[in-house]
Amino acid sequence: MQPDQIDQKPAGFDEREVNYTHNHKTFLSVLSGGRRADAIAPETGEVGIRLERILVDHVRQQPVSFEGDTGIEAVLTRLHDRLSAFDEEHGDGHLTGLVGSLISARGIIVGVRVTLGAGGQIVYEVGPCTHLAEILQAIEHLDRQLHVTTHGMGCDYDLVAEGYNPFVQAPLDVALVPRTRYTLLNAYLAQTGRYARDMMRCCCATQISLDYARGRSGIDAYRIAVALSPIFMFLTDNVRSFRFSGARRCPRMTRSLVWEEVDPARCGVVPGTFAEGFNTTTYLNWLESLRPILFTDSLGHTTSTGKRTLREVMGDRVFTGSEALGLFTTVYPNVRLGRRMELLQADSLRPRMAVGYAAFVKGIFCNPLALDSAADLIGQVTDEDVSLASYELRVRGWDAIIYGRPTSQIVSALITIARNGIGNTEELALLNVIAELWDFTMVPRDAYVHQEEKAARGW
């Protein structure tokens, strides 16, 4: 063979198409968790929680900034002194996270990551773990360590769990954490909707992840999660104020309203979710039609992908596993697929309520009989039905009719399904922390409304 023939490609060889085909198969493998999409997953009941909160300076009554001697980066640095076994994560020359594990009193190891949102939100990623009590224990341990750390710095800081930062009058009052990723996201999303800056800088969520092929096909479980997403948004509504509006003037499900106005193409319900034939390939086709905005390589370098769609980007070269996974994360539907199913749309909640909400989700989705019961309760729905349910709940609250039933009736039925699906007294007690609020037809935000009404009446 002549030297100039060694690297010659066969006639008609298209390297970009070969790269795309390879990456497409990798993405499908991610979406099926290494299984066929209709496979039955082991009954592990593993749940993960991502809890976002605002670090607030009580003396100044304002969020803590990222930089400075007592800023968030300094807090993370000092926190690492107390969590010395944790590894540091860095981005663009800054300390942006800690990752490690904690061992519970029962000897159970729980994976933990402490990281930052775009607006400096403190984020705990805990699990996945089969034991919710251990997840709560890990969150409370981290909270104690953070409190001791900030107290030792001479600061009166606290973590505030609300769906929207109540201490900010305008989102631009909050500086972005100095990372290329957030700069690129902000530049793109600010062109697509009214509230991109609010979403990135001021919103906080409680996100639950779980194995989505459990007891029935993964897509059926995904559809049930999407159908229930408006109810999850409603039941976890926890916004005290939107740009200093006050709770009484703040509409229900404010955070979901913000997300709807960010980018309709990548938020809400994935088109065709309830159409015949929807599967992981359909989901991937939707993903590939969108612009990924940015790409982070295996070395951690982030670059813009410009106006190109994901399908075009996938032709550049063969991606590593971590690079492929990163390209799943710049879409924000109500329920997102990756290696696990992620329920994105609950507001930030205090730790015990957050874990109670996780128990609610687990009771429904990690028990095949409970999942069947939830499917029967919801019945046949369409993409439009889900959007209408969100609207009705936002406008009418507990008086709304959704999926042909009164809200209070459908919520009561779901609580019963979740309680029966848990079968564990310890986790049942966790569920009851938040379910007892729902039993009185209240959601977390109602406490703020009640307080404002009392103040207005001079009580």
Image: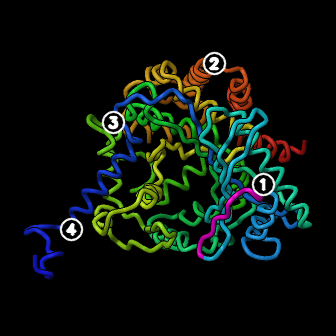
Q: Which residue is mark 3?
A: 36
Which-is-in-front pick, marks 2 and 1? 2
Which quarter of the figure is the N terminus placed in? bottom left
Which numbered marker is on residue 15? 4
Secondary structure under badge 1? strand
Q: Amino acid at mark 1?
A: Leu
Q: Amino acid at mark 2?
A: Gly
Secondary structure under badge 2? loop
Disc nearer the start of the sequence (3/1): 3
Disc nearer the start of the sequence (1/4): 4
In contact (CB < 8 Å): disc 2 and disc 1: no
Would residue 398 be found to the left or right of residue 388 on screen?
Answer: right
Q: CA distance from mark 2 to mark 1?
A: 32 Å
Which-is-in-front pick, marks 1 and 4? 4
In the rendered image, the vertical position of residue 265 relative to residue 95, given as above or below: above
Q: Which residue is mark 2?
A: 423
Q: Amino acid at mark 4?
A: Glu
